[in-house]
Image (tube, grey):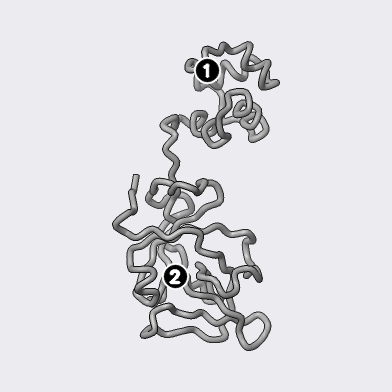
Amino acid sequence: MEARGLRDAPLSEAAGLHQSFVRDLKRGKATSPKLSSAVRLAQALDMSVEDIMNWADGQPDSRQTIAIAGKVGAGAQVPVFDAYEKGDGPQVECPAGLTPHGIVAVEVEGDSMEPVYSDGDLLFYSRNGHDSVPSEVIGLRCVCEDADGMGWVKQVKAGDEPGLFHLISLNPGANNIWNTKLKWAAQVRLHWPRDLVRKV
């Protein structure tokens, strides 16, 4: 508002919101706005909804972050995402081209995906369904959870029977997993080598 020379009344009118709400939000006396209010403010200020929510939450530096949910096994058996409570993991800067909303980061443990993914690398993905293996991820590199609660990063292929899947390692020397049940699988959206990871 200050950068644009806007006062409470003109902004509240442009956004279709009560002037008292805009005033309290600016002073930090109001809670984070509902999504519908944030959308109106974003349009009136020519900002993104994410920026509005960051300002409302007291994080106006516009540096977006993603929490590391835990570790996922490439060759090692790793209980899926057991390292941190949801959202409480270390934060990493959100990579360019990704939005932090709906994106999850996990750290690779093991070497079965060498030389593509290495121990300590980060993988970013988003899940469309809570418990599903969408047909569009078949044949792709995915983060997935098996029926025993183990997390993996593998190429997912259809198994020999409906409901079963082959988990293929990219490292020729590593073991593949044949005809296993999966709780869910999500395509890897982005891979960050560990030396590029910027924890916040």
- Counting from the top left corner in percent of width and height, residue 116 is at 39, 70
Residue lying farthest right?
Answer: 16
How many neighbours does mark 2 have within 10 angstroms: few (below 14), some (14-19), or many (20 or more)? some
How many neighbours does mark 1 have within 10 angstroms: few (below 14), some (14-19), or many (20 or more)? few
Which numbered disc, 1 or 2, marks the residue that appears first in the sequence?
1
Up the image or down, 114 lies above or below 58; here it is: below
Q: Amino acid at mark 1?
A: Met
Residue at horizontal 54 percent and vertical 30 percent from the top: 52
Residue at horizontal 36 percent and vertical 85 percent from the top: 173
In the rendered structure, find residue 200 and report the number of the disc placed on it: none
Which residue does the numbered mark 2 point to in the structure image? 79
Please identify the quarter of the rendering in which residue 79 is found: bottom left
> In the drawing, does residue 155 fall left or right of residue 121?
right
- The total of numbered circles placed on residues is 2
Query: At numbered mark 1, what does the secondary structure look like: helix, strand or loop?
Result: loop
Which residue does the numbered mark 1 point to in the structure image? 1
Q: Amino acid at mark 2?
A: Pro
Residue lying farthest bottom?
Answer: 160
The residue closer to the viewer here, 90 or 168, is 168
Residue at horizontal 55 percent and vertical 57 percent from the top: 126
Residue at horizontal 40 percent and vertical 46 percent from the top: 93
Query: At numbered mark 2, what does the secondary structure look like: helix, strand or loop?
Result: strand
Marks 1,2: beta carbons within 8 A: no
- Counting from the top left corner in percent of width and height, residue 30 is at 56, 24
> In the drawing, does residue 123 fall left or right of residue 148?
left
